[in-house]
């Protein structure tokens, strides 16, 4: 399972969605990065492949960071998303 974590401005809790395939995760990561680079804010709607009922929509100009990471079952339990854990 691959996790895409978004950090929003003025919010300390990250938003996280998962993808089963690396290709799909990379595609979503590139879509988010492209929206962040755009000068015009746009609405990004995200769904989760692990929890199919999970849906979230964010404005691209409110995203401050995006992290793509591989989750390996029990190895990821209790770990905080990001680089400083």
Image: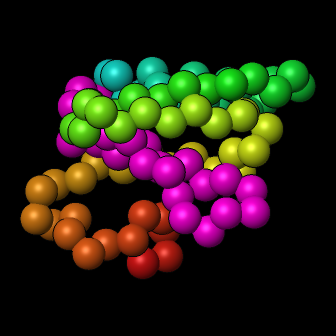
Magenta range: 1-22
Residue most extreme to the left: 74
Residue 3 on image: x %, y %: 35, 45
Residue 28 on image: x %, y %: 47, 26
Residue ID at (68%, 25%): 43
Q: Nearer the viewer, residue 33 or 63?
A: 63
Q: Nearer the viewer, residue 8 or 84?
A: 8
- 16 vs 79: above or below: above
Q: Nearer the viewer, residue 53 or 41?
A: 53
Is residue 30 among the parts visible in the rendering? no
Residue ID at (55%, 48%): 6
Residue 5 counted in the magenta span: yes
Residue 80 on image: x %, y %: 39, 71
Q: Quadrant of residue 33?
A: top right
Residue 81 counted in the magenta span: no
Residue most extreme to the right: 39
Residue 24 on image: x %, y %: 34, 22
Q: Pick the quarter of the image with the N terminus.
A: top left
- 49 vs 16: above or below: above
């Amino acid at each position: 399972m691959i996790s895409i974590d978004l950090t929003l401005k003025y919010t300390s809790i990250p938003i996280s969605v998962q993808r089963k395939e690396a290709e799909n995760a990379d595609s979503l990561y590139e879509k988010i990065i492209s929206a962040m680079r755009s000068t015009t804010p746009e609405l990004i709607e995200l769904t989760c492949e692990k929890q199919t009922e999970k849906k979230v929509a964010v404005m691209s100009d409110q995203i401050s960071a995006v992290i793509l990471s591989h989750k390996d079952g029990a190895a990821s339990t209790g770990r905080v998303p990001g680089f400083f854990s």
